[in-house]
Image (cartoon, helix red, strand yellow):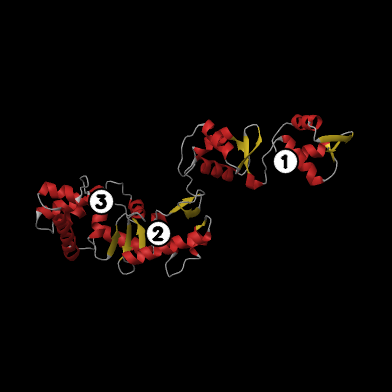
Amino acid sequence: MTQFTPQQLNSLVDSALDDLRKDRDKEILRLRGGINVPTQTLEQIGNSLNITRERVRQIEKAALIRLQNRTDVKNEFTKAVTFLVRRRGGLVSLATVSQEANLDSSLEPHAIFLVKINPNLVFIERNDTYSQLIADGDSFDANSIKAVHQNLLSTVQQMGKPAKFDNIYKLIDGPHSLSTIQEMAKASNGLCELDGNWGLSTWPEVNPKSIRDKIYLVLKKTGRPIHFSEIASKIASLTTNPKNVTTQAVHNELIKDQRFVLIGRGIYALAEWGYRSGTVADIIEEVMKEENGPLAKEEIIRRVLSRRQVRTTTIVLNLQEKSQFRRVAKGIYCLA
């Protein structure tokens, strides 16, 4: 998409507003849209103009309709946006338009205004469900966009776990392109993406909020047991919800949650990796019960070290000093 300068967009906005005869109409559209001025509410504008907020709303709506009927919609910007929207399957987020046109936040009000006065485009305001969207009026209206979004959320929810977007798209019912569904996902408040995986925003795997969720995510991504101080450091570098936390706070949460297993001095692993909580003596006992017979000291050490990151001497001392173990021959032990 062509990139636009502030001068170009201001010129396009001014040219469109010149089609309005009343200065009051122009002022209301600028104030409501936040075009080169702070955005004002209906009530704020009504108070300053000594009219009701309902009257402001009526004037705004009527002025936009007049511009849709009179303004040349084939200016450089709306042509570029229309081309982009159709190339993406009929639906794009405002964020995509801003990125493609290299618009900063101060120029987004200009873009929104120009889209709103184009009768071939549909602009969806930000709401609790998704952020601003721009659609091809021949392909979408507010209700059909809502239906696409609900279909997407339902599909992800049925999958039950985060997935690559291509896999989600394969399960989407309807004629919409991959680009359209991707744009819907980017704008959705109900979805999050992390490391290429998409899921519901309530899922900690893609949108971790609590310290415990972030600990789990760090361990899962690292794929191996690590010290709690390293976990605290990695939490600050997460691409979603990064936050500096104290090592003590991390350690406290590790202790409380059964998903995390202490396997060495300050070193934690995930229970889902096959680790079990317990002392070194507990692990030795578990190993010997699995064997159901005597084991050589070297073999006991090897098996315990696969489950715990401790010193060899710690394992030997437990074998020699704990009453539940008995030496039956040189270097051979069994349960007492």
Nearest to N terminus: mark 1 or mark 3: 3
Label 2 and label 1: CA atoms lie apart by: 46 Å
Left or right? Give the position of 323 relative to 69.
right
Distance, label 1 to label 3, CA atoms, is 60 Å
Q: Earlier in the sequence, mark 2 or mark 1?
A: 2
Q: Position of residue 93 (x, y in %)?
A: 35, 56
| Residue hosting label 1 | 306
Side of 162 where 56 appears, left or right: left
- Camera-side residue of 146 and 328: 328
| Label 3 Cα crowd, 10 Å radius (few <14 / some 14-19 / many 20+) | many
Residue occupying image coordinates x 18% and y 63%: 65
Amino acid type of the residue tagged 3 in the rendering: Pro
Dividing the picture into quarters, in which one does residue 299 lie? top right
Picture coordinates of residue 131, whole percent (x, y): 35, 54
Secondary-structure class at tag 1: loop
Q: Earlier in the sequence, mark 2 or mark 3?
A: 3
Residue identifier under label 2: 184
Q: Nearer the viewer, mark 2 or mark 1?
A: 1
